Amino acid sequence: MAVLTEVPRRGVLLRVLPSALYSGRSKAVLERTFLTYSHVWMLFVSGAFEPLFYLMAFQLGFGKLVGEVVGPGGQVMSYVAFVAPGLLAASAMNGAILDSTYNLFFKLKYAKLYDAMLATPIGPLDIALGEVGWSVLRGGVYSVTFLGVMTAMGLPGSWWAVLMIPAALLVAMAFSAIGIVLVTFLRSVSQFDYINLVLMPLFLFSTTFYPLSVYPAAIQWIVQIFPLYHGIELMRGLSIGVLSWSMVGNVAYLLALAAVGIYASSKRFGKLLLR
C-alpha cells in the first residue's frame, strides 16, 4: 500500500509561515505581470521619460539661472546635480505608486485577478511579494536609464553614484508596499484623489528642489518623517560621494517601511479575498 508523505517546505519563510499565507510562488505573480507588459511595452517604457524631461528642463533652462548650491557635507555643486538625485527618487516613487495603486486596483476590483490566484496554491504574501517585485524591477530599469543620462551630462561627482540604483530600488520597494496597503482600502476610482493629495506634497517638500535648511526648525522635523526625504538624502550623498552615518538611518527607515507594508498588504489581501 502506498503511503503519502508530506513534502518538506524548504526555505526560512516556507518553514515559518503557514502555506495558506505563503507558498513560495511569488515568482509566478511576477512572471504574469511581465508577460502582460510584454504586449504593451510602450506603457512600460514611457514612464522613464517624465523624469528625464524634468532633468533636461533644469539642465537647459532653470539650472542656468540658479547656478551653484551647497550640497551634502557643505560641498558646492551645480543646481542640476543637486536636483537630479531628487528627481530619480521621485521617479522611483511615482512608478511604484502607479503600479501598486491604479493597476492593482483594476486587478483587485474589476478583473478579480487575485481571486483567481488564491484559488491556486498562491497565497496572499506571494501576491504582495510578486507585485512589489515588479515595481522594484520597473524601478531598476528607470534608474539605470536615468543614471545613464545623468552620467552623459556629467552630473555624478563620484563612482559612489552607482549605488543610486539600489537606493532607487529600495525607494520603489517601500512605496510599492505602502501603495498596495492603501489601495485595499479604496472603494472607488474617485478616491485616488486622496493618494494624489499626499504624493504632491511629498514631491514638492521632501528636499527635491532645495535643501532641508531652508525650512524653519519645526517644519524640518515634519519633512524628515517623509519617506521620499530619506530616499533623496541617500541618493544625493551617493551622487557626489559624501557618505555619512545618517545614510544607515535612511536605509533602515525605507527597509522598515517596506517590511511593514508587505506584511500589512498580505494581511489585507487575506482579509478581503479569503472569506
Image (spheres, helix red, strand yellow):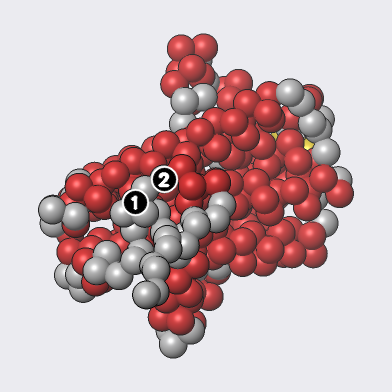
Crowd class of label 2 (few under 14; some 14 to 19; many from 20; radius 10 Å): few
**In the foreground, 75 or 148:** 148
Question: Could you tell me the amino acid type at mark 1?
Answer: Leu
**In the foreground, 249 or 22:** 22
Residue depicted at 54% across the width and 30% down the height: 253
| Above or below for 199 versus 48 | above
Going by the image, does 272 lie left or right of 73?
A: left
Residue 70, quarter of the rendered image? top right
* Residue furthest to the top: 217
Reading the image, the residue beneath label 2 is 17
Q: Are marks 2 and 1 in contact (CB under 8 Å)?
A: yes
Residue depicted at 74% across the width and 36% down the height: 237
Q: Position of residue 36 (x, y in %)?
A: 41, 80
* Residue furthest to the bottom: 39
**In the foreground, 85 or 130:** 130
Residue 127, quarter of the rendered image? bottom left
| Above or below for 12 versus 244 | below
Residue depicted at 51% across the width and 33% down the height: 256
Going by the image, does 44 lie left or right of 68?
A: left
**In the foreground, 155 or 244:** 244
Residue depicted at 76% across the width and 44% down the height: 239
Reading the image, the residue beneath label 1 is 21
Q: Position of residue 77 (x, y in %)?
A: 78, 38
Quadrant showing the N terminus = bottom left
Crowd class of label 1 (few under 14; some 14 to 19; many from 20; radius 10 Å): many
Q: Position of residue 224 (x, y in %)?
A: 51, 24
**Disc 2 from disc 1: Cα separation:** 7 Å
At numbered mark 2, what does the secondary structure look like: helix, strand or loop? loop
Going by the image, does 45 lie left or right of 97?
A: right
